[in-house]
Image: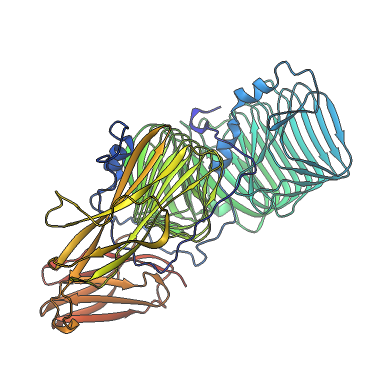
Amino acid sequence: MRKAIFLFVLISGVINAKSVTRSKDVNIPTPQTNVLSNKESSSFPKSKLQQEINKLLPQAVGISTPATKTNVPQDIISRYHASPFAAIKQIELNRKNAFTLTQNIPFNASTKGDWIIIDSTVIIDHDTTINNNILIYNNSQLIVRNCSLVVRGIIYAFQNSLFSVDSTSLVIPQDYIYQFGMQVGMHIMDSSKIEIKHSKINSSNLPLGGGVINGGSLLFDNVLMNEAFITFCTFGDKAKIHINHTDKAGEFVVLGDSSEVHISHSDTVLVWVGFPKGTSGKIYGDSLHMNNWINHFTYPDTTCNKITYSLVLDSLTGLLLATMAEDSTNVDLYNAEIRGSGHIFAIPDTDTIMGLVNGSKYSDFTAPFPGRNYHLVNSSVAAWNLYFYSGTQLSIKSSIFGECLLADSAKSLFWNAVCDGAGGHIGAAGKSFLISGLTSLYTDALMEGHSVSLMLFTNFMYGHLIAKGMAATILYNTVLANPVLIYDSATVMVTGCYPPSPSHTNENIPIRGSAFMLRGPNSPFSFDGYKVEYAPTKDTTTFFPITGRTTTPVDNDNICTFSTYGLNTGTYVIRLWYFFSAFGSSDSINFDNSIYLNWQNVEETTKPKELSLSVTPNLSNKININYVIPQSTEVELSLYNISGEKVATLDKGIKNKGEYTVKLENKKLANGVYFCKLKAGKEILPGKKIVLVK
C-alpha cells in the first residue's frame, strides 16, 4: 500500500452530543493578528500553538488571477458525492489493534470491548441488531440471509474470511459522516471477501467508508442502496471490486497496484481514476458522454505510463468521472467534464494555492500545485479536492474549493476562501494543524485524532462542526449554522467579542461575546474563565482591565461593560483572554478586536468622520454598501470576484464629504464570493467580502 494514503483515526460509539448555536446577524470586524499569548497564567513552555499561528496567519491577503473563465454553479451545496479521503483514512483501521484482538481468543461470536469476534462459521437468518464492531478473521464466515441486520459499527473481514449477505436488509445507522464502514483484506495473500447479493443497504443517508486492501475482494450483485452511499477504495496489490446491477452504486477510488475494478449494469456511479505516485496518463472526455449511457470504458490506455490497475466500466448510466493524483504525476485532460479533481500531497512542501474556483471551464490551464503537472485543455472541474499528508504546509487563499482535509502532521491555512461542499467537507486528523480565517463553509467540518484547529471569523452556512477523538478546536467570532456535535475526548473552546458600533465616550458600553467550552465525555480540558482588557491602538504596550477573571461561562451574551468615561475619541483594542487547563497545567489564549469611540452628545452630522467602508449584510441577496468620506474627493467603488477580476464599477465621481449608500444589484452576478473596494483620492481601503446566495 502506498505511503501517501496511510492514515486511520477512528474512535466510535454513542456519545452524549452537546450543542451551541450562533446568530447569523452578528457584525464581524476584521481580526488582529495577535491571537495567542502565554503572558499570563501559563505553566506550559512557550506555546507551540502560538508559534504555529504566527507562522501561518498572514499579515496581508492577496488575490491571484488564473487564466480561466469563472462560472460558479448555482447549486453551490450540491453533495452528490462524499469524501474519498475520509474513506481512505478508515482503511487502516489501526490494523495492529485489530490483529491483537484475534490473538489467543478461544471462543467464537464473542464480544471483546467494542468488538464482536467471529472465528468460525456463524449464520444469521432472523432479524438481528448488533451494537458493536464486527471482526471476522482466520478462515471464518459470517453468513446473513433472509432477514434484517442492523449493525452499529465497522464490519472488518481479513485472513481469508467471508462476510456474505443475501436477500437481506442491511442497516448501518450513523450519527455523522463516515462513522462506520466495511473493510476487507490485509495481506497480499489474503483472499477475504465481502459479498452482498439481492439486498438493500441503508446508512441513514450519510456516507460509509468502504475499503478493499491487497488480496481482498468486494462483490455487489443486485443491490439497492436505499438511503445509503458508500465510498469504496482499492489499495495495495490485487484488490478486487465487482459491482453488478446495483442502484446508486456509489463512488470508487482506484489507486491500488494490480487492483481490478469492474462495474457493470449499474447507475449513478462516480469513478475516481487514480494516478499513483510517479505515473502519467491522458483522458479524452469527448469519447465519454457523462450522465448518459456508457457502453464500455477501460483504463489505463496507451497514453498511460506505470499505471498497473485495471478499470472496466460496462453498460452504465449516470457516470461521473473524477481524477485522483498523487505527487510526481503528469496528467493531461482534453475536452473532459471532471466531477472532482482530487490531489494528494504527501511530500513535505511549503506553498500557497490560490485562484481555484469550482465549476470553472478551462481552455488551457495548468493547476498551481507543487510536485505535479495537472493540465486541462477545454475541460471543466466541478470540485477541487485537496488532501494534505505528512509534513506538508500548504495554504489555500482566495479560492472556492470542494474539499480539503489534513492528516498526519500536515499544517494548512484557509484564508478568504469558500468550501462549497461540492467535493465533500473540511477536516483535520492525526496531529495536523488547521487555521480557517475569513472563510465560508457550506458543508461539515470533521475534526478528529489529535488535531488542533483554529477557526477565526468563519461562517458555517450549512453543515455541522463535528469533533471527536482528542481533537481540540478553538472558535473565535465564528458563525455556526447547526449545533456542534462533540464525542469522545474532544474539546471545542468557543470565544467571541462583538463591540457595538457606533460607540461613544463618557458612557457604559455593554459588549456581547462568548467564552465557554464544549467537552466530550472524556475530555481532559477544563474552562477556567475569561477576562477583558483594553488599550488605545496608538499604544498597546499596556492594557487596562475592563473585568477581572470571570469563571462563569457566557454564550453569546454580555461579557463585560466598557466604561469610556474620561477616554479620548479614537480606536481602541478590546482584548479577550480565555483561560483553560488540561493534564494539571494551565494556559491561556487571547483575541483582539477593535472599537471606535465617537464624541458623546454631539449630533451625528457634526461628529468627526473617518474614511470607512462597510457592507450590510455581507451575506444576502439584498446588500447595501455604505461608505463615508471625510472631505470632498474623487471616489471609485468597485466589485471584484474571488479571482481578482473587476466585475463592476458600483459608484464613481467627485463626491462631497458625507455618508453614501449603494444598493448592490446582483441579478446578473453568480453565487459566490466577491470583494468590494473603495478608492478615495490616493487612499484605497481594504476590500470587504460579500457572499452572494440567491
Q: Locate the N terminus and report the quarter of the image it occupies.
A: top right
| Residue 557 as seen in the image, left or right of residue 342 | left
Residue 48 percent coordinates (x, y): 32, 35
Q: So how many labels did they put on this image?
A: 0
**517 in relation to 611, above or below:** above
Q: Which of 384 and 563 is in front in this view?
A: 563
**33 in relation to 301, above or below:** below
Quadrant housing residue 532: bottom left
Residue 73 percent coordinates (x, y): 48, 64
Residue 415 percent coordinates (x, y): 34, 52
Q: Nearer the viewer, residue 270 or 153?
A: 153
**548 in relation to 280, above or below:** below
Q: What residue do we see at 52% from left, 28% from top? A: 2
Q: Which of 587 and 652 is in front in this view?
A: 587
| Residue 637 as seen in the image, left or right of residue 526 | left
Task: Tell me if residue 300 can be seen.
Answer: no
**640 in relation to 633, above or below:** above
Residue 567 percent coordinates (x, y): 14, 65
| Residue 237 as seen in the image, left or right of residue 131 | left
| Residue 497 as seen in the image, left or right of residue 609 | right
Task: Tell me if residue 99 can be seen.
Answer: yes
| Residue with the most extreme top position | 104
Colouring mode (rainbow / by chain / secondary structure / one colour): rainbow
